[in-house]
Image: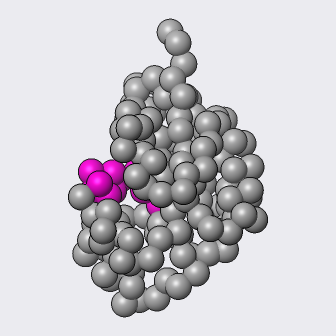
Amino acid sequence: MKEKLRWAFILDQDEFVRLSLHKMLKKYGFQVEEIEDLSDLEKRKKDVKEGMILADLDVESLERWYPMMKKWNDRFILMSSQIGEDLIHHLKAMGIQHILKKPVEPKLLRKMIRAMPFPDGIQLAPSVKPREGSRIDQKGGEGR
């Protein structure tokens, strides 16, 4: 069976953050691509469905891209240094489930990735084993 790629799309203005995330995600087995805007993903819907998006966006941008984000909320990790209780409540109300405070802690990122349900045939790197009971683990994937 041909192994499918897991894509990770990074949207962040800070070059250091992009490089750090790129290195971490490659280690976890992702094919990493940096994007400049969420519109870059319009034609990559299949890749997003089988991967994830990590982005540092302001609330206005999130609201503008809400229809797209609603489809991918289980594939989206919002990163921001401006995370407060009020903002978290607003983001959760918008349906954004995965929120990381910057600077991103590798252990927290790994924990979030492990909690994401990846489709069948998507192989996880050994350093990111799925949680017991996840769809991959139930199919006899790397978690066993």
Residue found at the far top of this picture: 1
Q: Is residue 92 visible?
A: yes
Give the residue at x 40% y 26%.
Answer: 120
The residue lying toward the viewer, choosing from 31 and 33, is: 33
Specify whether 38 is left or right of 127. Answer: left
| Percent coordinates x, y for residue 34 in the rendering | 60, 50
Instruction: Between residue 53 and residue 120, name the one nearer to us.
Output: 53
In magenta segment, residue 84 = no
Return the residue nearer the eye: 95 or 132.
95
> In the rendered structure, which segment of residues is drawn in magenta?
68-77
Image position of 133 with respect to 122: above or below: below
- Tag count in the figure? 0
Who's the residue at 49% across and 28% down the image? 122
| Majority secondary structure of magenta residues | helix
Q: How is the image coloured?
A: one colour
Residue 98: image quadrant is bottom left
Residue 143 in sight in this render: no
Q: Is residue 31 above or below residue 13?
A: above
The residue at 62%/75% (across/down) is: 102
72 on left or right of 124: left
Seen at 72% across and 64% down, the residue is 15
Whole-percent x, y for residue 9 in the image:
54, 48
Q: Residue 124 appears at what percent x and percent y?
A: 57, 34
Task: Reply above or below: 9 against 122.
Answer: below
